[in-house]
Amino acid sequence: MNNHPNPGTRRKEKQMNTVTRTTSVAVLVSLGLALAAGAAEAPSPVFTGDAILATMRKVNAYRLTQESARKWNAKPGAQGDNWVGGTYYTGVMALYRAASDKVLLDQAVAWAERGKWAPGKEAERINNLTCCQTYLELYAIQKDDARIAKTREYVDTLAKGAAGKNFKPINWGYVDTLYVGPPAIAMLGEITGDKKYHEYLDKAYWGTTDALFDKEEGLFYRDGRSIGLKTELGKKVLWGRGNGWAIGGIPRIMEHLPADWPTRPRYIELLKTMSAALAKVQQPDGLWRTNLADPEDFPHPDTSSAAFFCYAMAWGIREGHLDKKTYLPVVARTWRGLLNCIGPNGQLGYAQRTADKPGPTGTRGPQAFTDGAFLLAGSEVLKLAADLAAIEVTVEPVKAVSSNVRWPNGRIYRKETTQP
């Protein structure tokens, strides 16, 4: 019996093997394309609820180690009861609401008790209301009058005569006040039902805004000293975090104004104007620079402003005040940029230190107020997680710079002069 196939049979087998291999490759290619398509459509892990909450907790945990080291637990005066600690605890309350974790609530209550539920003790009187925001939020959870009695007495002193028919607008003098004071005043008006607080708020808020807002740029000057200043490139000086204070205060005010309050549309319009201006100057790493009008003035990213921008715009989207298609990518890029600035231990870097004008940032030296703003941002990003996960955005890596980089002690800006 002949066991060797004839040449014709060999040719047929070779042809069949070739077809089989070609078919297998085609199947594998098709499967690979399908997997790739599926991966592109899968929700981004950055924007899952678990990931967002885990990052918020990580940043807060790191901040607690810093708080203990600075002896906030024993000495409220060590930045604990001023605008620094007060801003941080507005974020702690946001994390508490997001996580429904009593440990976080206990953290806030313990801090308030150390401060004896009293306004701060700074020379800048409006700054002293920053910590009162948390007292008022805690009062809403447990209605103990002792939690807000000192706040009410303090605001009554500030607002004396504000309801008068001839009371003139107030200029608080610097843009930071639009975050540290107004939310507490708005909350007090909501809690008491006394419209004098909202009237006082409007007088001061819009008086300050009219004095410091640049209508051409859609952004704020920090204070009167900044108006007319120019950088080496001939650009204006519009401080990043100053504008963060301004836009970050809007959601916290709006949530406590009556639905029919006459100036509500004006707050919404300001949110829209600022958001449009900020979107135009967002940088490729998803963040902003400390001089919004001149990114080259100090070219490194600033998380202290970006966190506030992220918070306010995410809130604006969720509330229907900002167009989702336009601003979701802005928020997504900002959140990714912020995540790129968090170290393995939860340290949020690239936060400009205490300042009143543009300046340098670096990888180290996290700031409590920036951590608070980040927690506020995370609380709103969490509510938009499904929408954010459905879009694809990319950001450039943050360019590393050490915290001890040498800069001039103070940037000297030239004053713009009017030609005769």
Image (cartoon, rainbow, N blue to C red):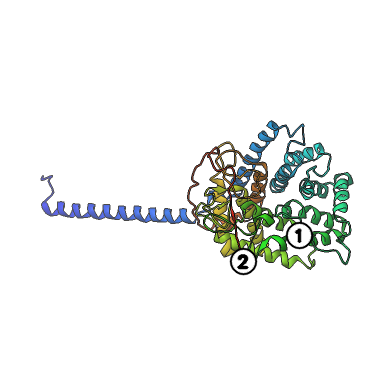
The location of residue 241, given as percent across then percent down, is 64, 51
Q: Answer few, some or many: residues within 10 Å of disc 2's Cα (few below 14, many 20 plus, some between 14 and 19).
A: few
Using the image as rendered, state which of residue 6 and residue 416 is in the foreground: 416
Compared to 387, does 366 lie above or below? above
Depth check, front residue: 244 or 186:
244
Type of the residue with mark 1: Tyr
Q: Which mark is residue 216?
A: 2
Q: Quadrant of the N terminus?
A: top left
From the viewer's perspective, is 16 left or right of 132? left
Q: Quadrant of residue 19?
A: bottom left
- Percent from the top left, x then y, of residue 118? 83, 43
Q: Which residue is mark 1?
A: 205
Q: Position of residue 188 (x, y in %)?
A: 83, 54
Pick the residue in front: 321 or 198: 198
Q: Earlier in the sequence, mark 2 or mark 1?
A: 1
399 is higher (above) or lower (below) than 209: above
Task: Sort mark 1 into few (<14), some (14-19) or many (20+) by Cα contacts within 10 Å.
Answer: many
x%, y% of residue 314? 63, 57
* Residue found at the very far front of the displayed protein: 420
Hey, what amino acid is under mark 2?
Answer: Glu
